[in-house]
Structure formats: C-alpha cells, structure tokens
Amino acid sequence: MSGHYEGLPCKHGHGNTRYITSRVCVVCVRNKASAWKRSNPDKVRAACKKRRERYPDLWKRESREARNARVVAFKKRNPGKVNAETAARKQHIKNATPSWVDKKELEAFYVEAARLTQDTGMKYHVDHIHPLRGKSLNGLHVPWNLQVIPAKQNLQKGNRL
C-alpha cells in the first residue's frame, strides 16, 4: 500500500496500517476526524460554505447536454490530441494481444455485442474483465478476458475490475 507502513496493530486494535511519517493508525485518524465533524457541525458548515465561495466552479453541476457539447467542441479544437489518444489506445490493444490468440475468437465478442445492440435496441460493449490499463495489473486482449455487457454497466465500471 503506497504511503503506508505495515506494522503492529494500534492500541485500539485497528489492523496494522499506519501512516509512514507519523506511524499513526489510519483508522484512528479517520475516527477522530469523524468524531470532530459530528461534534462541530457549525464549523464544518462554515468551512464548506467558505470552500464553495472560494472555488465556485468545483460545485457546478453541468447537464449531460452541456458536457457533451463541451466534449464535441474540445474534439473539434484538438483533433491532433484526439487522434493521438485513439492511436495510443489501438497500439495498447495491439501490444496487449498475444500473437498466438485466434483473432476470430476476439471478433466473435464484437459481433455478439453488435447483434445484441441491434436486437434489443440497447447499446452493448465488449468489456475487458481485467482492464488493459489497470492500476494494479494490466489485462490482456484475449477471449477469456472479454465479456459482452450493456454499455451503461461498462461505463459505470470504468477502468476497474
């Protein structure tokens, strides 16, 4: 675990995860902060209000249409960046595909996703169970790492297992 020291449990018996520099138990720090927040609701509210006033853009919620328009505008202004990202993703998939994999087996997943999309009217994606660009491990572009799932579920899953 990055930034943590694995040592003995704290005096309250919370596991063995502590911060490296202070060697203070992570759970104890969180519990203390939660207790302070519960006992000082006015100070918490005031701090939140001050933060919202200082950084108003962080608290805005934009509509789906506004976000889509912003993304389309970015893509029009930056075709080079978009092309570079697309090329990098394709290259990453190519690098994650072993030479011994049967390409027809991979293609079958994409054909199935297209068939389900057409038959149900709901969009389907081919998902990598172990993401190609995972935080802790990188999956391969192989048949046993692929699944066809609804697009909404795949987008919610993101780059996680």
Image: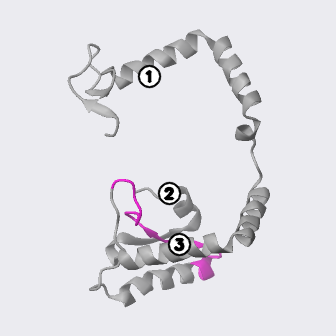
Q: Which residue is mark 2?
A: 157
Q: Amino acid at mark 3?
A: His
Label 3–label 2 contact, CB within 8 A: no
Q: Earlier in the sequence, mark 2 or mark 1?
A: 1
Give the total of numbered labels.
Answer: 3
Q: Magenta residues, as a range?
A: 117-136
Q: Quadrant of the C terminus?
A: bottom left
Mark 1 crowdedness (10 Å alpha carbons): few <14, some 14-19, many ≥20:
few
Label 3–label 1 contact, CB within 8 A: no
Please identify, in this view, whether the residue under mark 3 or under mark 1 is nearer the observer.
1
Q: Which residue is mark 1?
A: 30
Distance (Cα) linking label 2 and label 1 = 27 Å
Q: Residue at x 74, y 57 (%)?
A: 67
Q: Earlier in the sequence, mark 3 or mark 1?
A: 1
Q: Residue at x 32, y 73 (%)?
A: 144
Q: Residue at x 62, y 71 (%)?
A: 82
Distance (Cα) linking label 3 and label 2 = 12 Å
Mark 2 crowdedness (10 Å alpha carbons): few <14, some 14-19, many ≥20:
few
Q: Quadrant of the N terminus?
A: top left
Answer with left or right where residue 151 lies relative to residue 25: right
Q: Amino acid at mark 2?
A: Lys
The location of residue 5, given as percent across then percent down, is 27, 30
Distance (Cα) linking label 3 and label 1 = 39 Å
Q: Which residue is mark 3?
A: 125
